[in-house]
Image (spheres, grey):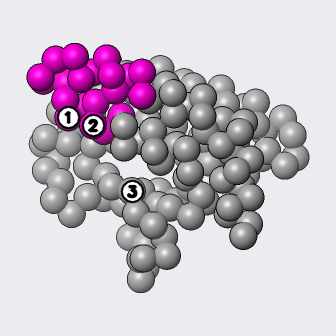
Amino acid sequence: MFKMILNLIWLVFAGIELAVGYVIGGVIMMITIVGIPFGLQAFKLAGFTLWPFGRAVVPAPERSDLLSGFGNLLWLILVGWWLAAAHVIFGLLLCVTLIGIPMGIASFKMAGLALMPFGRTIVDRATLDRLPADAHIVG
């Protein structure tokens, strides 16, 4: 119940705005054939940004370190820096109020994901037996 309340508050005060940023970035990336994987990643992150509490970001089992690193470098240059900046700005605004502090902290955690999303996957925390040591937990 607590996660649902946090998600609803998050949705109203930051989720929709941040998700729109990811969708805009995804649409821009999908213009070229080379950008399709980046656009798909942006759309996946948009969904996560809408409803993040109760989910975790874990390393993808099928990841290739070389491809993930190359994808993250291109992502960072093209859209990652401004998406991460948006998360930091929303995080600061949310931390101004007492009730917004947990959501502000979540936004700061999501800024790292916005910088380098490749090689990770989003999972429901309830489906995991235990979280990997390098998992990024939002809520």
Q: Give the quarter of the image for residue 23.
A: top left
Question: Residue at 25% across / 31% down in the picture?
Answer: 38
Q: Which residues are magenta?
A: 23-42
Residue 121 on image: x %, y %: 33, 55
Q: Main secondary structure of the magenta part?
A: helix
* The N terminus - image quarter: bottom right
Q: Would residue 75 appear left or right of 99 to someone viewing this image?
A: left
Residue 40: mark in rendering? 2
Please, is residue 49 above or below residue 135 in the view? Answer: above
Residue 9 on image: x %, y %: 74, 47
**Which amino acid, mark 3?**
Ile
Question: Residue at 45% across / 45% down in the picture?
Answer: 47
**Which amino acid, mark 1?**
Pro
* Residue that badge 1 annotates: 37
Q: Give the quarter of the image for residue 91.
A: top right
- Magenta-drawn stretch contains 119: no
* Residue that badge 3 annotates: 122
Q: Are marks 2 and 1 in contact (CB under 8 Å)?
A: yes
